[in-house]
Amino acid sequence: MFDLGDLTLSFCFFGLLAYFWRAQGTRELALRATRKHLEQQQLQLLDGHVALRAVWCKRDTSGQIKLWRRYIFEFTATGHERYKGQVITLGNRVEGVELEPHRFPNDIIH
């Protein structure tokens, strides 16, 4: 039969599994927001992904503690130069997308 140690280990395993499942959904949310923001700016996402750089516990506007995450990505305006950007999430909500100073597509002379 199961003892308390087995039950605790199982609980921890399923807790970690749930965390990683939820984290994957938040990453997908951040990726969609990044793609939409870059499309509106006529910029292109490079490598097709966002990478998790930082995780922190932070309170939202209602005072609840949520996971704050910072994802980074690279983008281009010209197709030749790479710039960095970041997208911030708090819980399952995108807080904002920030871009490094970069050339604008209309500034490029062909």
Image (cartoon, grey):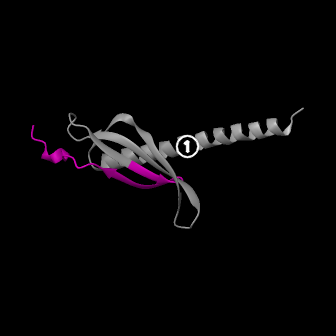
Q: Position of residue 95 (x, y in %)?
A: 43, 57
Along the line of sight, the residue nearer the viewer: 91 or 48: 91
- Left or right of 67? Residue 39 is left
- Left or right of 107? Residue 58 is right
Q: Position of residue 51 (x, y in %)?
A: 43, 39
Q: Is residue 15 magenta?
A: no
Along the line of sight, the residue nearer the viewer: 43 or 98: 98
Q: Which segment did they paint magenta?
A: 87-110
- Left or right of 21? Residue 46 is left
Please identify the residue farthest to the left as the structure is shown.
109
Dot 1 crowding, Cα within 10 Å, few <14, some 14–19, many 20+ = some
Q: Position of residue 4 (x, y in %)?
A: 84, 40
Please identify the residue farthest to the right as the structure is shown.
1
Residue at left offset 37%, top offset 44%: 35
Q: Position of residue 46 (x, y in %)?
A: 32, 35
The mark total stands at: 1
Based on the displayed image, in which of its 4 quarters is residue 11 positioned?
Answer: top right
- Element type where label 1 sits in the image: helix
Which residue is tagged 1? 23
Q: Is residue 103 magenta?
A: yes
Q: Which image quadrant: the N terminus? A: top right
Above or below — where is 15 with respect to 92?
Answer: above
Identify the amino acid type marked 1.
Answer: Ala
Based on the displayed image, in which of its 4 quarters is residue 64 positioned?
Answer: bottom right
